[in-house]
Amino acid sequence: MSQPSTTPVAFGSHGQRAVLVLIGAVFVLLGGGVLASDHSVPGIAIGAFVVGVGAVAVGRGPIVGVRVDTRGVTHRTLTRTTVIAWCCIRDIAAGSGGGSSPLPTGAPVLTLDDGRTRVLIGMASSTATRRGQSAVEQHRQTLLTQHALHRAACATC
Ligand SMILES: [Zn+2]
C-alpha cells in the first residue's frame, strides 16, 4: 500500500506520450506531403485531415494521463479532458483497457453514481507482463486510498 497523500498525483506513461508525439509528427509530415503535392480538392481535404490528426497527437500527447487531487480524477486523452469528482465515484475496479492496443491492457475502471463506467485509458498498462498487472493494481489502490480519504472528509458524500 502506498502512503495516503493529499498532494496531486499524476500518472502517465512517458513511453506512451513519446509514441503519441512521434506518431503525430509522422502524420503532420505525411499530411504536409499530400498538401504540397496534391492540389485537388480531395487531396487538400485528406492532407488537411491527416495534418489535423497529427497536430492533435503532438499537442495533446504530452499531457495524456490521469491526475488525482483532492477534487477528483482528471482524465486526459487525445480528444478530451474529463474531470470526475470523487463525489460522483461509487466504485473503482480493475478492468480491461479496451482496444487501444494490440497487447492486452488493463486500466482502472470507475463506476459513477449514475451507473455509468469510465475506463481510465490514460492510466492503462499492458497486462502481458506481471509488472504491468501489478501497475494496474497499484494505480487502483492509489485511487481507492484517495477516494476513501475524500469520503472521510466530505460532508455531502
Ligand atoms: Zn464527496
Image (cartoon, rainbow, N blue to C red):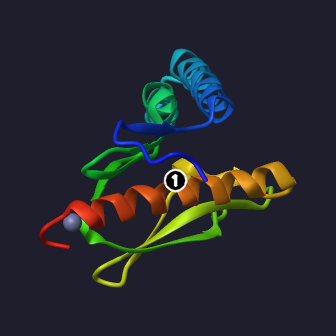
* The C terminus, quarter of image: bottom left
Residue at 50% in and 57% down = 120
Q: Is residue 61 left or right of residue 33?
A: left
Residue at 61% in and 53% down = 1
Q: Note whether 141 is above or below 59 in the view shown.
A: below
Q: How many labels does the image show?
A: 1
Q: Is residue 8 left or right of residue 134?
A: left
**Image x and y of residue 142, in percent:** 51, 53
Q: In which quarter of the image is residue 45?
A: top left
Point out the quarter of the image occupied by ligand 1.
bottom left
Element type at mark 1: helix
Q: Is residue 19 visible to the viewer in this orientation of the structure? A: yes
Q: Note whether 77 is above or below 140 in the view shown.
A: above
Residue tagged 1:
142
Q: Quadrant of residue 15?
A: top right
Residue at 56% in and 49% down = 123
Front-most of residues 24 and 74: 74
Front-most of residues 144 and 26: 144
Q: Note whether 111 is above or below 81 in the view shown.
A: below
Front-most of residues 70 and 99: 70
Q: Quadrant of residue 14?
A: top right
**Image x and y of residue 57, in percent:** 50, 32
**Image x and y of residue 22, in percent:** 64, 24
Question: Tag 1: Cα neighbours inside 10 Å, few (<14), some, or many (≥20)?
Answer: some
Q: Note whether 18 is above or below 7 in the view shown.
A: above
The residue at the far left in this view is: 155
Front-most of residues 69 and 13: 69
What is the three-letter code of the residue carrying label 1? Thr
Residue at 48% in and 23% down = 39
**Image x and y of residue 50, in percent:** 52, 34
The residue at the far bottom in this view is: 115
Q: Is residue 101 visible to the viewer in this orientation of the structure? A: no
